[in-house]
Image: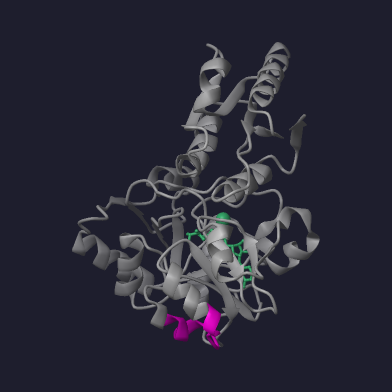
């Protein structure tokens, strides 16, 4: 187990933070909470430290990392030029769940960006993340703190499930409040484009960028090339995920129940990610049902999504049944993560 330090975001222990910050400066790996998901941090300007992130996560070198900063003014250290739109977005949405892809500064080592001439940058709002970056005095490269292709970690406990001696320290600041990763927007092309829907809604961005494009990566190989992390097999639990989609909620529930019964009669153990309007009817003594939140309460659903996937895995289910919310607001990101965890298989309910 890595050394886990509990840290109160509202009352940060200065000794623990000083130690974590010096670890970062020494090239070590420190997992830390952000408002979206936990990250594994290393000094973004130290190529050797960054290489250790890829090794720890067993992540392909072709999947670039996000550089985290603790003030918009720190953008100058990692990007080549700052377009006016980037500054306007920073002013409106930073600190927060927005990652911007910009032209990279030569100071950023090539392995941070997988050799691309762009770099992903984010200014997180979580007080522990901010304190760590500020006190380390360097930008921090950090991917989500899960093993490659596993569901992301939204608590210190999740981080310690996936990692052992690979990490030098884990700062456990409680549960991430947003629960899905940041929204990634590419500002290097002619038209600003969302490469990954996330914690900041597309509607909020559209209000400032009417021409905004959204690429749903799993459908196009093109995006796999521009944003290599958007591979389909991602955020996957060990169990197979079956995803139900449609317009009629009660028919979706009936389809989920009959699928569960069919699977159980062939000897499978079934888990369900259920919303409040599904939980009562779908619960039976042999099923493992995780309550995501009130149906329509997208904040609760996104916050508990990865926790639910991990909990059902821990219970040893063979199959996980879930339904998709409609793609508005946070629903777009939730749908995207569920779709990937189901490896693209959706059951359409008429
Ligand atoms: O919320 C988050 O963004 C979390 C927390 C820790 O900040 N981080 C996170 O990192 O989700 P990661 O490594 O799991 O996902 C980074 C995503 C990947 O899809 C990657 O391909 C994309 O950002 N990305 C990074 N640099 C890029 C670049 N230069 N061009 C295009 N996509 C890039
Ligand atoms: Mg990730």
Residue at (34, 78) in percent of width and height: 137
Tell me: 77 left or right of 330.
left
Residue placed most toward the observer, 166 or 86: 86
Point out residue 304 in the picture as x, y percentages from the top left corner. 47, 39
Q: How many marks?
A: 0
Q: Quadrant of residue 102?
A: bottom right
Point out residue 232 in the picture as x, y percentages from the top left corner. 71, 51
* Relative vertical location of residue 12 with respect to residue 236 in this rendering, above or below: below
Residue at (44, 50) in percent of width and height: 178
Point out residue 249 in the picture as x, y percentages from the top left corner. 64, 28
Tell me: 292 left or right of 64.
left
Q: Report the quarter where the C terminus lies.
A: top right
Q: Which residues are magenta?
A: 74-85
Note whether residue 70 is visible. yes
Point out residue 43 in the picture as x, y percentages from the top left corner. 43, 73
* Relative vertical location of residue 103 with respect to residue 60 in this rendering, above or below: below
Residue placed most toward the observer, 208 or 281: 208
Residue placed most toward the observer, 69 or 216: 216
């Amino acid at each position: 187990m890595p050394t886990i330090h509990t840290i109160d975001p509202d009352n940060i222990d200065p000794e623990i933070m000083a130690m974590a910050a010096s670890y970062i400066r020494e090239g070590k790996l420190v997992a830390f909470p952000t408002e979206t998901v936990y990250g594994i941090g290393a000094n973004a300007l130290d190529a050797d430290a960054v290489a250790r992130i890829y090794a720890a996560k067993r992540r392909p070198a072709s999947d670039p990392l996000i550089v985290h900063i603790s003030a918009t003014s720190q953008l100058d250290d990692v990007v080549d030029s700052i377009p006016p739109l980037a500054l306007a977005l920073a002013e409106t949405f930073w600190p927060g769940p927005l990652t911007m892809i910009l032209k990279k500064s030569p100071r950023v080592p090539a392995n941070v960006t997988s050799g691309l001439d762009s770099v992903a940058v984010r200014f997180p709002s979580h007080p522990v993340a901010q304190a760590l970056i500020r006190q380390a005095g360097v930008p921090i490269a950090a991917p989500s703190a899960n093993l490659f292709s596993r569901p992301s970690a939204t608590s210190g406990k999740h981080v310690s499930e996936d990692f052992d001696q690979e990490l030098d320290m884990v700062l456990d600041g409680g549960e991430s409040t947003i629960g899905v990763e940041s929204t990634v927007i590419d500002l290097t092309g002619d038209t600003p484009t969302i490469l990954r829907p996330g914690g900041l809604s597309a509607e909020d961005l559209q209000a400032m960028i009417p021409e905004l494009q959204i690429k749903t990566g799993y459908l196009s190989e093109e995006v796999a090339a521009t944003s290599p992390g958007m591979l389909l097999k991602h955020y996957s639990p060990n169990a197979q995920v079956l995803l139900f989609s449609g317009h009629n909620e009660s028919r979706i529930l009936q389809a989920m129940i009959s699928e569960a019964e069919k699977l159980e009669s062939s000897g499978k153990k079934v888990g369900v990610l259920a919303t409040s309007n599904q939980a009562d009817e779908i619960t039976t003594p042999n099923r493992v049902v995780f309550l995501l939140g009130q149906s329509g309460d997208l904040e609760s659903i996104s916050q508990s999504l990865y926790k639910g996937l991990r909990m059902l895995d821990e219970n040893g289910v063979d199959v996980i049944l879930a339904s998709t919310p409609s793609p508005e607001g946070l629903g777009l990101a939730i749908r995207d993560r569920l779709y990937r965890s189901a490896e693209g298989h959706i059951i359409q309910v008429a």
